[in-house]
Image: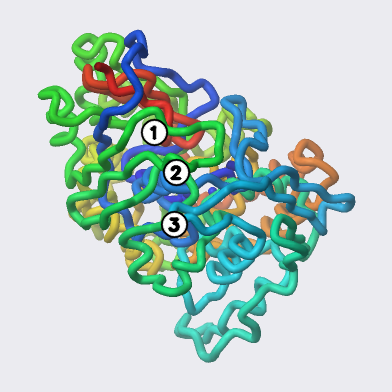
Amino acid sequence: MKLSKRRSALVAAGISGALLLSACGGGGSDDSSSSGGSGAGAEGGTFSVYIGEPENPLVPGNTAESEGDQVISSLWTGLVRYTEEGEVDYSGVAESIESEDNTTWTVTLKDGWTFHDGSPVDAESFVNAWNYTAYSPNAQGAASYLARIQGYDDLQAPVDEATGEATGEPAATEMSGLQVVDDQTFTVTLSSPFSNFPAITGYNSFHPLPQAFFDDPEGFGTRPIGNGPFQAEEDFVPGQGVTLTRYDDYAGEDAAVADSVEYVVYADVNTAYTDVQAGNLDIVDVIPPDVIESAESEFGDRFIRTESSQITYIGFPTYDERFADPRVRQAFSMAIDREAISEAIFQGTRAPADSFIPPVIDGYREGSCTYCTLDADQANQLLEEAGFDKSQPVDLWFNAGAGHDAWMEAVGNQLRDNLGVEYTLQGNLEFAEYLPLASSQGLTGPFRIGWSFDYPAADSYLTPLFTQAAFGPAGSNYSFYSNPEVEELLVAGDQAESPEAGLEDYQAAEDIIAEDMPMAPMFFTEIQSVTSENVSNVRLDLFQRIVTSEVTVNS
């Protein structure tokens, strides 16, 4: 995921934020834009899209980051989809998702949906997929989004607290909260009430899987079989990509306009941008920061601005002794001049972040992050109180090839100038290598991470990033932060009668997180994209994904 998982309510990564976490940026916004042009091209044709290397094979439950999520969004359609305003839209596979108590939900499917191999999308295909994803020996990266379902804990292997290694087999292979009623109906019983459950079911973890997956899980990830507007008739080749073709028997309302979409893997977004300039590539979703100013004049109406739901963070490895004290994390955050970096590096297109819930989401409060404002004097006082050793440089981590070098170096320069702490840039890992290192507590200093909601709700910025259930490979809590009071408040917010009623508890949890500062919010993000003259009707959705079914190839 440019955003890890991770791009909805845990509407999807990163939910990758799934993770969707992001390699180059976060999820899109409810103020999506389209590229210029008349859109008068005939149906058919092919177009190409830049992506970074996905972290894992293309299986929905193991895709919680932006690169794989972009491809998954073309191959699958979930139970629900989302309007441009962030509301749940029953234009997916679900006819309805209903409950009288917010605990036991009845999911009724529409008839006529099929996978790309012609097999039916039925209740069993959802239940089997969710059980496979939740079963911890399968090590699916987006498993934690299923944790609210009754019986999820029984599918988790016991773990040695000292080593973090599994010490046995799970107690069960199927969640007790899932029951198939008939081909078009199944029930979901949660371990406690959660009013926002319908919204979360649009996320990758909740997508269906055909029998072909269970027959050959490893091969499936190379040539996946989904139920979306495009299908894979060839293998995904690491380092190269894949061409997907239109699925003519698609049952959804958003059938593909083009004949095919070619996803092209690039190690460096700068190369991809150059290829769009030359007409050798059609779409780059997030262009490099240093070309933003020139791109607008060069591309004209083929330069697209999208208000994003992404927050860019500097995360702290709370498991590292140097960053275990909250005062150290507060100090580092207060030593950074976000406004100066935005103006110098991003030409003012990144707004300094002042909260853990962004302005595009209900629950945002201006200035709720008190340590997000530059104050070098207080920062130095906090470091002195914490006994931080300034003589040792800190490692600053970020993924390679996505345009993060300049602004991370600017962060390092400010830490040196304002705190007297030297730094070493650690930006050599590809995104597919970076996230696994983060999941295994391998980051040795502050690190860049992007997060976009998995579904449009305040808890999608809190639960996946700041709870124990999201530790390790099955989650997105890369700082490995834990606070029981935060977890209690998030549960209370979940159990409120409605998402709106839960906001007070979610905001109270945010206040504690803002004091503990396991991650420092850096920027609220606007996404800048460019296209070639070959395409029109290019739009980014709420999760920063290109809506490939709408793209028109110009004749």
Relative to 378, does residue 129 appear above or below in the rendering?
below
Task: Name the front one of labels 3 and 1.
Answer: 3
Q: Secondary structure at mark 1?
A: helix
**Badges 3 and 2: C-beta atoms under 8 Å apart?**
no
Which residue is located at x 53 percent, y 67 percent? 133
Which residue is located at x 50 percent, y 68 percent? 211
| Residue sitting nearer the eye, 340 or 126 | 126
Q: Which residue is mark 1?
A: 548
Image position, residue 517 (x, y; %)? 52, 49
Q: CA distance from mark 1 to mark 2?
A: 8 Å
Left or right: 512 as drawn, with respect to 348: right
Image position, residue 451 (x, y; %)? 46, 44
Relative to 16, does residue 377 appear above or below in the rendering?
above
Task: Name the front one of labels 3 and 2.
Answer: 3
Q: Which residue is mark 2?
A: 73
Q: Secondary structure at mark 3?
A: loop
Image position, residue 87 (x, y; %)? 66, 32
**What amino acid type is highlighted by mark number 3?**
Asp
Q: CA distance from mark 3 to mark 2?
A: 18 Å
Instruction: Please report whichever mark, 3 or 1, sits nearer to the chain's N-terminal start.
Output: 3
Instruction: Please report whichever mark, 3 or 2, sits nearer to the chain's N-terminal start.
Output: 2
Which residue is located at x 25 percent, y 60 percent? 392
Label at residue 267:
none
**What amino acid type is highlighted by mark number 2?**
Ser
Residue 100 in sight here: yes
Q: Which residue is mark 3?
A: 117
